[in-house]
Image (cartoon, rainbow, N blue to C red):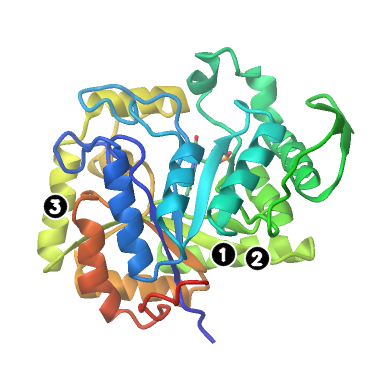
Amino acid sequence: MVRPLDLGIFLPNAKGGAIMATGSPPQYYPTWDLNRKNALIAENAGFQFLLSMVKWRGFGGETKHWDYSLESFTLMSAVAAVTSRIQLYASVAIPTVHPAVIAKMTATIDDISNGRFGVNIVSGWNKLEYSQMGLWGGDEYFKRRYEYATEYLTILRALWREERVNYKSDFFSLDDCKSYPKPSREIPIICAGQSDRGIQFTAEHADYGFLGGQDDSLEDLGRLNSKLLGVADGFGRKVGAYVLLTVIADETDDKAKARRDFYIETSDKEAMAEWARVAGMDFSRATYKDLAVQTFMAIPYVAGSYQTVADYLDGLAENGIAGVCFIFPDYSKDLQLVVDRVLPLMKRRHALQPQAVPA
Ligand SMILES: Cc1cc2nc3c(=O)[nH]c(=O)nc-3n(C[C@H](O)[C@H](O)[C@H](O)COP(=O)(O)O)c2cc1C
């Protein structure tokens, strides 16, 4: 049986989202007002989750891409207060904050949200984000980042479950550490690591992982999904695979593709060069296809008519993907457009009616 696809939103909490182009859209400032409106549209349409990212440094350029971002936990705390049914995830960059602090922030938002909160574990890839505050552990840290993440999550779970925690290692020292209140449930954990080691961490410790790059076909995503589920099975665990997806939907395939091409033609070369530099990528002899990869930040996208997008989403579910997390070029109107025009055409979706508000 094909399971209906979970639907989520990658909230617009960092300037420019995941499209490195100079126009407006896709450029926007990440205001509370914009995030609140998208959160409420998604909840009212019956979406399953909202995720915000954590970002401490952007890529500059004409667009100042990601230079402005709202902090993830404080943002989701506010989102928790204005929503009542949808699952919420904040992201923590684990080199920046001790797990005892995150344990308590999580318990706080679990209470505010009435048990709807989860955590996305970000091990950190952009050295400059952390070295600018003296928090980069060097190349050695990067090699060992999922070892660090494993200990970090072990400590979080211990603080959420146990009365007192004692823990000593190369990375941490907890001495009779207490954390109350305890969260009301097991906190769901996401990890979006893409490397073999990241995928192994997800399979062994997390509840949901993200998979897929821009060139992956639906069948490729199906194979990656089977691989992730197979590794998790080896650990005696069940994990759900999500796909982060930029959606450009319009009346016709041609109109949507024209919008996609426009973003590629107006891409912010300076910000893209800085992204490439800090990520250690070489785009110096980029072809048009490479330009698309860079403009859409290597994230999978679908550009097509409402029916094309609906069919693509059904295809994800039919290839075993548990859920999709949407990115939009224009958060001021694209989510409502997808709710009104795309979702009614999908076969593999949850019922769209809002669920009953819990008492
Ligand atoms: C859905 C999704 C959300 C992510 N959120 C963040 C984030 O909030 N902050 C960040 O620095 N990196 C984020 N990343 C990057 C991942 O955490 C990870 O560093 C990246 O995919 C590289 O994987 P690796 O660590 O296995 O090499 C995200 C990636 C995806 C696909």
In the image: residue 18, left or right of residue 1: left
| Amino acid type at image mark 3 | Arg
Gap in angstroms between the C-alphas marked 1 and 2: 6 Å
Q: Image point 16% across, 43% down: which residue? A: 25
Gap in angstroms between the C-alphas marked 3 and 1: 30 Å
Q: Quadrant of the N terminus?
A: bottom right
In the image: residue 33, left or right of residue 182: left
Q: Image point 23% across, 42% down: which residue? A: 288
Q: Which mark is residue 229?
A: 2
- Report the residue that reaches farthest toward the front: 359
Kind of element beneath mark 1: helix
Q: Is residue 118 visible?
A: no
- Report the residue that reaches farthest toward the bottom: 1
Q: Which residue was labeled with disc 1?
A: 225
**Which of these two is toward me, 251 or 332?**
332
Q: Which mark is residue 259?
A: 3
Q: Are marks 1 and 2 in contact (CB under 8 Å)?
A: yes
**Which of these two is toward me, 203 or 162?**
162
| The residue at label 1 has a CB less than 8 Å from ligand 1 | no
| The residue at label 2 has a CB less than 8 Å from ligand 1 | no
| Amino acid type at image mark 2 | Leu
Q: Which numbered disc, 2 or 3, marks the residue that appears first in the sequence?
A: 2
Within 10 angstroms of label 1, few (less than 14), some, or many (20 or more) residues? many
| Amino acid type at image mark 1 | Asn
Count of labels shown?
3
In the image: residue 315, left or right of residue 203: left
In this rendering, the answer to whether 91 lies above or below 242 is above
Q: In the rendering, at what x and y percent does residue 274 appear?
A: 35, 22
